[in-house]
Image: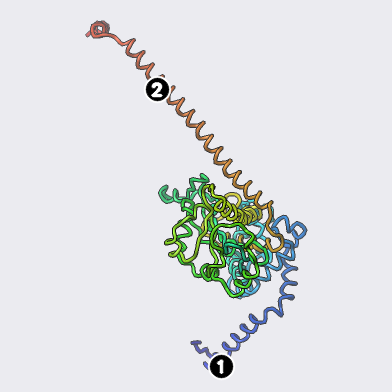
Amino acid sequence: MVKPRKGKSVEALIDLEESREAEYIESSVSFARTVPDIEEIMMGRSLIFRKYESGMVKLTNFTPSEVVNIYRMCLPRIIKENTKRGKKPSLTFLDHVFCYLYALKSGQTMASLSVNIGESESTLHSAIRRIRPIVTESLNSNTFIDRPAPNPLSIGLICDCSTFQVYRPSGFYDESKKMFDVKNNIYGIKVLFFVNINVWGKVKCVFLSNPNVGSSHDFLILKNLGINNEIKEYLVKTKEDREREDMDKYEDMDIEGKFGRDYDSFCVLGDSAYICSQEIQNKIGYRILAVPKYKSKDEDVANRGKYLASRRVHVEQFFGRLVGAWNTFRHVYRFEHKHFQMDIENAVNLTNILTDYNGLGDEDSFEYKNWLETRYGMVDERKKNKLISNKKWRNRKKKRLNDSQDNIQDFLNNSLDDEEIINESKLLCSSLNY
């Protein structure tokens, strides 16, 4: 209720407030009519964007027009952010978007970003902190999930986990050791990705889990998701999916087992870590196919395993594009852990946009393999250095032990017997006139 002021009636104040609300709603609904004017003003004031416009692709993976398109997606929430009270930011929101994309692309520290862009660390930190949730909400709301393409086994989603290296968390060792991934020998955050091949032949990540500690097992993350209603509804076959399956012929493919058209829903494909019983699949709410751990001597089973392994290549290609495009996740994650979920969601959505411009290919698989080889090479080097240091430590310990034993033996050999000690004491007392 509006409090009455001196000189105006309550009814007049209520009418004034309602008119202001109506003007605000009208301006927010019809913001599209003012978008060209806003963009023209924003382009004129965005000095950082104009400064690096020529090398935009190298710095952000996007052309200047594509960066402006991402800014347009965020424009409704930017307008809402601008209506808040308080001090206005020194940089324009188009510069905010550029700085955030540049930070994800480069993976540099805030000090290095400050030197390269030419702004203070506090300015860049505030800009990234302000634009990060806006980009997350905008990209998530503008994401359209296409239906999976028909295939013999009705594979709707391909799932796999990936661990991203982070700094060792501060605190007690019992708490921080949960973040340690023994396989990769790093402190990391593990995320489960669900990738699909849509009807247009594009590979995109449509779902991903919340961040988990690095010590979590891959299947345990999938099991903890429980009955995810979004995934379960997505896997249910629609009428259009049935029609597309009826148009495709699979009789010429030598795959052992029932065809996917015999089921009412698509399934999730994983590697050998996701082998589970039918009871667990019923609890999760959808079927899970897993690549066999060992190669079978049966030709039909071997062909089926080979086909499943060939389908899993696409999730590795997506990982290769993700770490190749955004160095923030290729190397150590340099922001605070609480921002990881928003950053990984933004990186995934931006990678989906990149796959629209340029589809995934073999070069992305090579990028993923090089990333793993580099990581495992660092692990082997750490183990090698640890063995060398342990060997040096053992040699030093052995030398100290031998030296102490020699000193003890020398002391025992040079020690006097009882009679000699008595004579020496008498001589000493006589010399002192006792």
Q: Left or right: where does residue 78 sit relative to residue 301?
A: right
Q: Position of residue 160 (x, y in %)?
A: 54, 56
**Quarter placement of the C terminus:** top left
Residue nearest the viewer, comparing 62 with 349? 349
Residue at image coords 52%, 37%? 383
Relative to 429, residue 286 above or below: below
Secondary structure under the numbered disc 1 in the rendered image: helix
Residue nearest the viewer, comparing 189 with 204? 204
Residue at image coords 40%, 22%? 401
Q: Nearer the viewer, mark 2 or mark 1?
A: 2
Q: Left or right: where does residue 232 sit relative to residue 94?
A: left
Instruction: Write down the residue under mark 2.
Output: 401
Sort mark 1 into few (<14), some (14-19) or many (20+) by Cα contacts within 10 Å: few
Secondary structure under the numbered disc 2 in the rendered image: helix
Q: Residue furthest left?
A: 434
Q: How many marks?
A: 2
Dividing the picture into quadrants, the one containing residue 7 is bottom right
Q: Position of residue 115 (x, y in %)?
A: 67, 52
Q: Amino acid at mark 1?
A: Ala
Q: Position of residue 195 (x, y in %)?
A: 59, 61
Q: Position of residue 217 (x, y in %)?
A: 47, 53
Instruction: Write down the residue under mark 1.
Output: 12
